[in-house]
Image (cartoon, grey):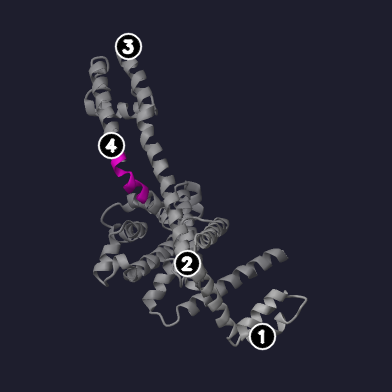
């Protein structure tokens, strides 16, 4: 019991801390910029952005579960009022989110412009998904006296697509499709060609024996697709010897033809994840090469790591790898110095030490260097020479 209370207090404390961090980081910024930081991962978002994401994801999942359970008659009869209240709450939450995203969208460079930018954002796929998630509810209110709006309920399940925004999977999948679109189009053409040829052969071989099932080539296409895809419902099947022999052949061919797009997409998706993670490594390498990573850079890297589904262990491993590579590169660069370059590098190091020895901070170091138990003779002699 005490552990549960302590856990809840820790969650409340973390939430309060994230709110304070957000207020501090967004002090002096406009209301639109604050809304954008709440709904998008930015250097000024902090943990509060993740809390909002978790609330929306939870609302989506609860809403979808309630939509599914509504179709069970005895459950709907018991919890009809609760389902109605839950629908109002989730639609209100999703509506506020949609309005906030449209309002703050012009803070993003691709959608710059108060009117044109917002209209462009409203036509994007994520915005259309958000709109479809709430539109059936309002259309049901407006049109329920004119037409039967019960068919709109099925569109409420599109809310599940909202989760793709928070996983980053949809973006990665779109990138993978764009990269491999030519190969996928060629594969789709082969599949279409096989379906047409198979349906034509099936029509020619089975039309006389089964005129009710293989009456036209378009009707035979249904049989061709389920045969090539190795589904085989059995509602339509050849009965002639040639038709059955052809079915065996095209079933074996279909296993390879229909497996090509799946293999391509799996390979492209994995390759795109690798590219994104290498980009994250390069970004961290560039920021580290410029000097110490600032707090803003740290939050930006965390936001990118969250988008790529990198765990804390993955981020630590990548950072250690980059630091190790840069350290080795620095050592190799020093080893490659020769002649005048090596002498110049030595002079630069001496100049930096002399500047430090003449600085006010050096006074605090002098007593420590005078201790013979903690310093060597060479260290004391070098320090005395630098102080002259």
Residue 352 visible at all: yes
Which residue is the site of mark 3? 241
Real-space Cα separation, disc 4 to disc 3, in angstroms: 33 Å
> Which stretch appears magenta?
174-183
Marks 2 and 3 sit apart, C-alpha to C-alpha, by 86 Å
Q: Which of the 4 image quadrants contains residue 371?
A: bottom right
- Closest to the camera, between mark 1 and mark 4, is 1
Marks 4 and 2 sit apart, C-alpha to C-alpha, by 57 Å
Q: Residues within 10 Å of mark 4 (few under 14, many from 20)?
A: few
Residue at image coords 55%, 82%:
355
Work out which quarter of the rendered image holds the C terminus and state it: bottom right
Q: Quadrant of the N terminus?
A: bottom right
Distance from Cα at disc 1 to Cα at disc 4? 73 Å
The local secondary structure at tag 4 comes to helix
Residue 145 drawn at (x, y percent): 28, 58
Mark 2 surroundings within 10 Å by alpha-carbon count, few (fewer than 14), some (14 through 19), many (20 or more): few
| Label whose residue precedes the other's in the sequence (1 or 3) | 3
201 and 93: which is toward the camera: 201
Residue 64 against residue 286 in the figure, above or below: above
Q: CA distance from mark 1 to mark 3?
A: 99 Å
- What SS does tag 1 mark? helix
Secondary structure at numbered mark 2: helix
Q: CA distance from mark 1 to mark 2?
A: 34 Å
Residue 364 badge: 1
For disc 2, the marked residue is 341
Pick the residue in front: 368 or 293.
Answer: 368
- Which residue is painted at 30% across and 16% down in the image? 243
Indicate which disc residue 186 carries.
4
Which residue occupies the foreground of this view, 182 or 326?
326
Q: Earlier in the sequence, mark 4 or mark 3?
A: 4
């Amino acid at each position: 019991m005490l552990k549960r209370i302590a856990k809840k207090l820790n969650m409340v404390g973390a939430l309060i801390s994230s709110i304070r961090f957000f207020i501090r980081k967004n002090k002096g910024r406009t209301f639109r910029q604050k809304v954008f930081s709440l709904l998008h991962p930015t250097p000024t978002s902090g943990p509060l952005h993740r809390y909002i994401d978790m609330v929306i994801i939870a609302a989506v999942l609860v809403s979808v579960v309630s939509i599914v359970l509504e179709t069970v008659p005895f459950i709907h009869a018991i919890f009809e009022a609760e389902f109605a209240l839950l629908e109002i709450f989730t639609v209100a939450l999703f509506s506020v989110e949609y309005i906030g995203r449209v309002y703050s969208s012009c803070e993003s460079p691709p959608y710059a412009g108060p009117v044109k930018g917002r209209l462009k954002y409203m036509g994007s796929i994520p915005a259309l998904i958000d709109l479809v998630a709430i539109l059936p509810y309002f259309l049901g209110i407006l049109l329920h006296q004119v037409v039967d709006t019960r068919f709109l309920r099925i569109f409420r399940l599109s809310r599940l697509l909202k989760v793709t925004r928070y996983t980053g999977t949809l973006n990665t999948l779109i990138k993978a499709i764009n990269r491999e679109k030519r190969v996928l189009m060629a594969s789709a053409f082969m599949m279409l060609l096989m379906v047409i040829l198979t349906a034509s052969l099936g029509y020619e071989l089975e039309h006389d024996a089964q005129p009710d099932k293989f009456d036209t080539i378009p009707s035979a296409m249904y049989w061709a697709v389920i045969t090539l895809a190795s589904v085989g419902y059995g509602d339509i099947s050849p009965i002639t010897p040639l038709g059955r022999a052809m079915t065996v052949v095209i079933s074996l061919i279909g296993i390879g033809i229909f497996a090509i797009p799946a293999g391509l997409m799996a390979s492209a998706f994995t390759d795109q994840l690798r590219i994104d993670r290498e980009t994250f490594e390069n970004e961290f390498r560039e920021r580290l090469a410029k000097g110490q990573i600032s707090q803003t850079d740290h939050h930006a890297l965390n936001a990118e790591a969250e988008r790529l589904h990198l765990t804390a262990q993955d981020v630590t491993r990548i950072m250690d790898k980059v630091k190790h590579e840069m350290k080795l590169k620095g050592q190799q660069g020093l080893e490659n110095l020769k002649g005048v370059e090596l002498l110049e590098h030595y002079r630069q190091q001496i100049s930096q030490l002399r500047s430090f020895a003449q600085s006010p901070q050096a006074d605090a170091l002098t007593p420590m260097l005078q201790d013979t138990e903690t310093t060597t003779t060479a260290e004391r002699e070098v320090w005395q020479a630098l102080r002259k």
